[in-house]
Amino acid sequence: MFAFLVAQASDWITPVIDWHAVAPELVLVAGINIVLLIDLNISDAKKWVLATLTGFVMLGALLPVVTLAVIGDDSRSLFDGRYVIDEYALILKAFFLLVAYVVILMSQTELEEGGYYQGEFYVLMLCSVLGMVMMSSARDLISIFVALELLSIPAYMLAAWRKRDVKSNEAGVKYYLLGVFASGVMLYGMSFLFGATNSTLLTDIGAALTDGDLNGLEVVGVVFVICGFAFKISAVPFHTWAPDTYEGAPTPVTAFLSVASKAAGFVALVSIIFLAFPNASDVYEPLIWTLAALTMTVGNVLALRQTNIVRMLAYSSVSQGGFILMPLAFAGNSNAGGSALNAVVVYLLVYGFMNLGAFAIVIAVSRKTRSGEISSFGGLFGYAPGLAVAMTVFFASLAGIPPLGGWFAKFNAFRAVLQAETNPAYVLAAIAAVNTVVSAAYYMRVLRSVWMDDAPDGDTSPVVTPAPIVAALGITVIGTLVVGVYPNAITRFAELKDLTGAIVP
Amino acid sequence: METLTDQTWLLTVGTFLPMLGALVLMFWPKNDEAGIKGIGILTAGVTMLVGIYTLVQFDYGQSAKLQFFVDAEWIPVIKSGYTIGLDGISLPLYILSMAVTFLVMVYTWDNMPEAGNTKAFYILMLVLQTGMAGTFIAQDLILFFVFFELVLLPMYFMIGVWGGEDRRYASLKFFLYTMFGSAFMLVAFLALFFQTGAESFGFAQLIDAGAAIDRDVQIWIFAGMFLGFAVKVPMFPFHTWLPDAHTQAPTQGSVILAAILLKLGTYGFVRIAIPMLPEGAKAWAPAIGILAVIGIIYGALGCLAQTDMKRLIAFSSVAHMGFVMLGISTLTSFGINAALFGMVAHGLITGMLFFVAGSVKHRYHTLEIQRLSGMLIQMPRMGWILGFCAMASLGLPGLAGFWGEFPAILSAYQPGFGLSEPLFRTLMVVAAVGTVLAASYLLWLYQRTAFGEPSDEFKGHSDAEHDAADRGHGVAHSLSAAANDHAHDGDDAHEDIHDVQLTEWLSWTPFLVAIVVFGVYPQLMFKVMDPAVTQMVERLGASLG
């Protein structure tokens, strides 16, 4: 055995590393160490420096992403094609870094005022973002798994950050237990795939799996891997952790989980479906169709009943996940495949802006009201018209009303589905259309409180919004509006050719 | 389709100018009420001037062609462009939307709804205007959809914030109904696009390609569009949001809703659903005709059962839009011309009726028909205007309402493209009965509110009565009725029943004049619309073979 390993090791060839291509990751790694070291050596009073520093690390990592995009030659492939930097990876890396930057803006005041462990928070956040950035490029089962764990494990801790709060502990534990369980299921499925195809490289698996010729092992592998990711993206019936975790976790963390962590799950799912399962559509299409239909419907119906805004946003994010998932059910359709990829990526980008914005508003307002009830938003339009208008932008966008970003995301998802021109596609589109209306009901109910109700207890003192949150709101409002009016700003980044090696049969 | 591409900037400026005004208002100090109103009215006024310039520049000899046409890149990935243009079908509605918004804003100068916040109110009206104008110029399905939906939020807030007692319920109902319709409409748009395999979402391409789709598929796609447009019109049985929305909305909201928003639905049928899906339209025409006539009768009966003046006018809208839809369902150029005329006429007349209702409410603080009476004694001018509008609304020849209703009924005598004559002739007869009912509810309304003695409750509170009393005592009353707006403030709740005031005159006169002008000389509008309608019906004929 040992001799065998030595024999293997002697074949070791130092891989050629394209340092420019991995620069974003390197900046993050360096940033993690710097933040950690500084945190150890400064007094509590100066911890605020860390937030700023972490923000700069995010922007610093964004810099090579931009230069890579500007140089824009062919995709850069590292480690035998297991780690690929293509347009698809770049747009998503930029997205994750920007989201993380906004989340840091949102957490800053909360952490300072709450007396939480600031240094550790930012270090863990950076680790998680590193995992996400790696996920965008991972094209191998093992690198996907490593990235997934790297982004999840810090998130489990972040969810439980309010140490003295029972709910926050519950959030962390639930998230952890179910997350680990999901990882187990996924890893089990991956082992089946490896056993059946003798490779962990996605494109190799894709070549080995062929429709109509799948054996039981392969089918189980495909199903388990998808179900494992279904936990990550909180698709029904694997969504049960989401509302409790979202409600219990500190709100900026919830925003981070519901946008970045979820997006990372989708990114992995997209890579796997387009690279590894293009010829297994007989298996995954009905599975994803069902997951999507259930997710949007159940998420919506449960959201209708919520009185707490964070829980409502949790269920709303479950339901939005259904919409993001919907086009993937037709990824293997020769008409719709390309549009499906585009639809998922565009939806993620838009969803990032509007959902982060919605949470930023919740943070801003609850600083004053100290309540998470929807009714506590009453009268906001009277005493804080700016926040009320921003909130209208985000919630109307989530409901999919033009000319705010959400409409284009939804439209694009519908477009991809209908392009398939099959009966399941029409049925799913009809289900989604009904769901759009149902979702409008609860989003509008919040806006109704904001615009039409009186302030509870008649407290109309103005809301003081700290500068970082104003900045976060500015970024998200502008993003939501620009995408809605000029969708071309993002759609062109997410075409099929941008994902190296993607196949639509 | 041939297009004219002169002065391509004109429509864009006319549509987005209100947005600019809204942007300026957003940064204007909230307390400067007069400044806010001034900017709002100025923006709408300049927009109106752009509209008048458009009217002047429009080439009436070629009104079948799209003019001021622009086809710019917008979202190339989904093959949707910024394609806009104006032809004889859309011109009257485009101008109407500008005029109505401007006049409503003038009216608001003195009649701000109670909830206050002038700034937000004017911003919403300006945003609404962009949405409405944009819907009428869009020549691309996706662009149309965006504008069509853009009006949703402002109207939701307008009803919800500045509305009456039940405003929350009414606004949400309005919103969800419309959203429901448009969700299916969007699915239908996409299905149409993919079924035709068209190169873009432009109307022209889809009209060319749409006829080639299988009949069964066309029927399904038409059904989706039908949901979207029929909710907006609203057609029976999707009308139930309308009475609530109208009753609860502030006067300004009601006027805009009646005058323009309802037309987005009928316009959608004429511009999109029918030309793009000829077979689907033909298959659906009988159903649309039947629902339209049910709407006429149902609306009229609903009117007879109302105790609230505003709700009565709202139900009369259902009936009137029934006539419009009946005209459209015949698929003849005669019927569609009548429908388009009816849309504008209804916009003017019902808009005016809602104005009057708003002013009555403002003075009497009630719209209960039972409590109102003797309006002609207390406010003679207002009473006459109400009478005039009631007459116009019931379709009196010589006023605009007649030319929408009568030809629509007539067109059902001979529907196009082999549609069942017995069916449509039956519909014609029933619709004719509807006009009798219209006369009865409107005259009944007029009789109860305007004739007779003022009720005890309000007796002696009006300026007209004061003047009479003053003359009787030989005391010179130095303040004229129109100018002493708040002279009697304080001592009595009903002291402020005065006749039509300056801002009301300013905003109403154009409506009243237009009702007469189009009533006396309907050709003014028919000759603009007819070439475009005829061309559309000819194309329909070509594809229905």
Image (tube, coloured by chain):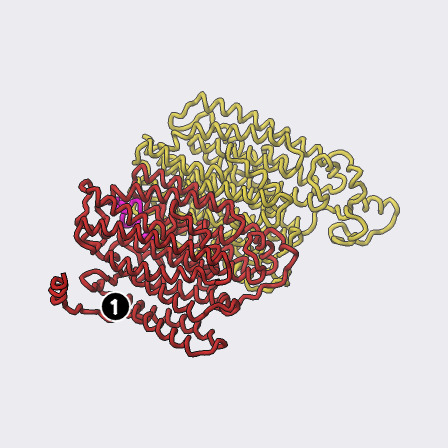
Chain colours: A red, B yellow
Does the rendering let one see residue B419? yes
**Secondary-structure class at tag 1:** loop
Q: Which stretch did the figure color magenta?
A: A328-344
Which residue is rendered at x = 63% and y = 36% of the image?
B390
Q: In the figure, residue B282 lies in which quadrant?
A: top left
Rendering coords of residue A144 (x, y %): 27, 58
In the rendered image, which quarter contains the N terminus of chain A? Answer: bottom left
Q: Amino acid at mark 1?
A: Ala
Main SS type for the magenta part? Answer: helix
Comparing A69 with A243, the one in front is A243
Q: Which quadrant holds residue B367?
A: top right
A279 versus A76 height, above or below: above
Q: Residue furthest right?
A: B473
User: How many numbered marks appear?
Assistant: 1
Q: Residue at x 41, y 62 (%)?
A: A157
Camera-side residue of B50 and B177? B177
Is residue A442 left or right of A77 when viewed as pictured? right
Indicate yes or no whether the magenta region holds residue A340: yes
Q: Which residue is mark 1?
A: A21
Q: Is residue A254 magenta?
A: no
